[in-house]
Amino acid sequence: MRVVIVGAGIGGLAAALALAQSGQQSLVLEAAPQLGEIGAGIQLGPNAFHVLDQLGMGETLLKGAVYVDSFRLMDSATGRQINRFSFGTEFRQRFGNPYVVVHRADLHRSLLDACTSSGLVEIRTGVTIERFEQDARAVRAVAAGGRSFEGDALIGADGLHSAVRAQIVRDGAPRVSGHTTYRSVVDVEAMPEEFRWNSMAVWVGPKSHIVHYPLKGAKLFNLVATAHDEADRALAGAAVTDEEVAEKFAHLVPDVWRIISCGQAWKKWVLCDREPVENWNDGRVTLLGDAAHPTLQYFAQGACMAMEDGMCLANALGAFGPDVVEALDAYRRERLVRTARIQLGSRLIGDHIFHPSGVHALTRNATLESIGDAAFMNAFAWLYDAGNTHTSVKRPTAVPQPAV
């Protein structure tokens, strides 16, 4: 079997590597002229490491990761801590893996190196796929200029603005959330000393929230500041001035402002997602990651879900053998509700946990203050579960036929 994968991001490479582990060849087509990842820090929950362990990369990634010891929820309107949930020994034992943060480029590079060394993954850059065509025997990805690439299956891992999705789902442009995110990475010395926590810190406030956590052995800090500012046009990675960032978050308490003011070389994104859809398959073609179920950032699960997709997809193709259509449908069914829960839940977190004000915020604080570590872990067991059954697909056993 030969699988064509459109997109060499984290999800596309994870799928290629998972396929290689089962002896299947893949051709990965990337529109960009050079391979790389945009962004800085990325959070990896235990569920991500369940996949990375299956890919043989868990130990490698953990060596360069920062094990954050807690999740601190702070109130940026008052400056006080709402609660602190431990990511320590009990959390790791419960879910079988830690909660860590790594540089996004490090994760991408590790996946790329593993794909290259497998001998079963071919990667071509500068190839923009515009559409696909298929028959009963094969499927072809058609690039700009008419060149085509044939395989037994085609995986659209081409992101939020997926050309493969456009042909299958036909749902137009992504939904603009009205939330603008500003990102910066600073040296640890620039971060105010009293806030150099080894934590996933989230400051929630009126129509805004701030996230910071250490990177690269705590030599760097990742800063993410998000404003619910009703932005109505998609934007990705645009450079902005310090003055624009200052204006967006001037209403927050001085402690938060001190954190934001140490940022530099800020870039901004206007966040987008899409409505969950029940079907993202067409015969020998399926979608993966943001092409299938793009989500807002509030569960910190976009890349994690894409890696889970890749492993589940490879398992399905292995379980169903030459029956590609059935394999892809089994993969879709396995992933559908879990990924939709992330999409819809992320919207709820943004609107009702991170960004409320007034009585709504007071009620949030009172509710979350009363939650202990055990209740916190129970609430996230569906997501981080150590069993991680969400990447495995088994061929149904044949129904016994009555004796003649």
Image (spheres, grey):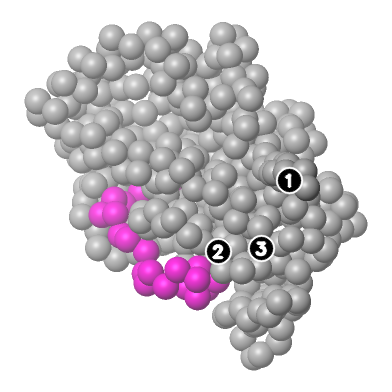
325 in magenta: no
For marks 2 and 3, the one nearer the N-term is 2
Residue annotated with mark 1: 401
Amino acid carrying mark 2 in the image? Asn
Left or right: 291 in relation to 35? left
Amino acid carrying mark 3 in the image? Val
Give the answer, above or below, for where 178 lies relative to 375.
below
Amino acid carrying mark 1 in the image? Gln
Distance CA(mark 2)–CA(mark 1):
31 Å
Residue 86 or residue 150, whichever sits in front: 150
Residue 296 or residue 196, whichever sits in front: 296
Q: Is the C-beta separation of discs 2 and 3 under 8 Å?
A: no
Residue at 83% across / 56% down in the picture? Answer: 24
Residue annotated with mark 3: 325
Q: Residues within 10 Å of mark 1 (few under 14, many from 20)?
A: few
Residue 218 visible to an observer of this rendering: no
Distance CA(mark 1)–CA(mark 3):
24 Å
Residue at 67% across / 51% down in the picture? Answer: 313
Residue annotated with mark 2: 281
Give the answer, above or below, for where 294 lies relative to 40.
below
For marks 2 and 1, the one nearer the N-term is 2
Give the answer, above or below, for where 170 lies relative to 104.
below
Residue 373 at x, y percent in the picture: 43, 10
Quarter of the image for residue 391 reads: top right
Residue 321 at x, y percent in the picture: 79, 55
Q: Nearer the viewer, mark 1 or mark 3?
A: 1
**Residue extending furthest toward the bottom:** 145
Q: Is the C-beta separation of discs 1 and 3 under 8 Å?
A: no
For marks 1 and 3, the one nearer the N-term is 3
Residue 30 or residue 273, whichever sits in front: 273
Quarter of the image for residue 146 reads: bottom right
Magenta stretch bounds: 163-188
